[in-house]
Amino acid sequence: MARIRLRKIQSSDSKFLYELLKERNPKSFISHKSLPTYHEHKQFVKSFPYSRWYVIYFNSVRAGSISITVQNEIGIWILQKFQNKGIGSKALEILIQKSPTKRYLANINPKNKESMEFFEKHNFKLIQYTFELKNNETKKKNKAI
Ligand SMILES: CC(C)(COP(=O)(O)OP(=O)(O)OC[C@H]1O[C@@H](n2cnc3c(N)ncnc32)[C@H](O)[C@@H]1OP(=O)(O)O)[C@@H](O)C(=O)NCCC(=O)NCCS
């Protein structure tokens, strides 16, 4: 039977995490608008940006990563070739066991229907819409007045 487990991120995971990052479709994330350089990425990994950050193993192979921030926001990424095999569901369950807290959040791009369905399936409920002011566009409009 397939075994899914989490292991804490090490700096030697940088290359794997960069491969994961390169697969990201722009609709699937909110924070990074463009791909960072490998050097920027390595610095990011070294900076311990999350409260907990794990590599997800599928048997002996790295299949994705899962993290939780100090604000209890979960981020989960599975390599495309390993999606829809139940790995994300199991990893989410293990992360929640390892990080007991009153609430868990997930910030999802509204265009990312698959992820919204994934979190809904795991009993997450939509609580807010967040809007971002696009400064440049506002400035352009003001100039025209
Ligand atoms: C969203 C994401 C994390 C889901 O992970 P996943 O491993 O593909 O999800 P799962 O396989 O656990 O569940 C997805 C489907 O697989 C099905 N599944 C579960 N176990 C399965 C198994 N053993 N064999 C086949 N399918 C299975 C589930 O039933 C589910 O289908 P359903 O929606 O019809 O119920 C993953 O697709 C991903 O990394 N997406 C890109 C990154 C992203 O958008 N992340 C979210 C931002 S935080």
Image (cartoon, grey):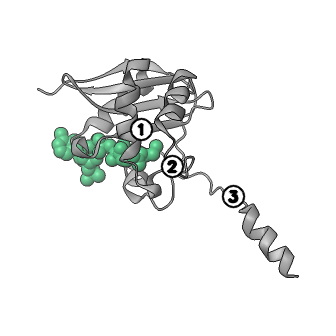
Sooner in the amino-acid sequence: mark 3 or mark 2: 2
CB at mark 1 closer than 8 A to ligand 1? yes
Residue 7 relative to residue 125: left or right: left
Quadrant assignment for the N terminus? top left
Q: Return the residue nearer the eye: 43 or 52.
A: 43
Quarter of the rendering occupied by the C terminus: bottom right
Which of the 4 image quarters holds residue 85?
Answer: top left
Which badge, 1 or 2, is on the more N-terminal residue? 1
Judging by the rendered image, the residue that carries numbered circle 2 is 125
Dot 1 or dot 3: first in sequence order is 1
Residue 49, percent across and down?
57, 27
**Discs 3, 2 touching: Cβ within 8 Å:** no
Q: Residue at x 78, y 69 (%)?
A: 138
Secondary-structure class at tag 3: loop
* Mark pair 1, 2: CA separation: 17 Å
Q: Residues within 10 Å of mark 3 (few under 14, many from 20)?
A: few
Determine crowd level at label 2: few under 14, some 14-19, many 20+ residues with C-alpha closer than 10 A.
few
Amino acid at pointer 2: Lys
In front: label 3 or label 2? 3
| Residue type highlighted by circle 1 | Ile
Residue at image point 69% right, 58% down: 132
Q: Quadrant of residue 105?
A: top right
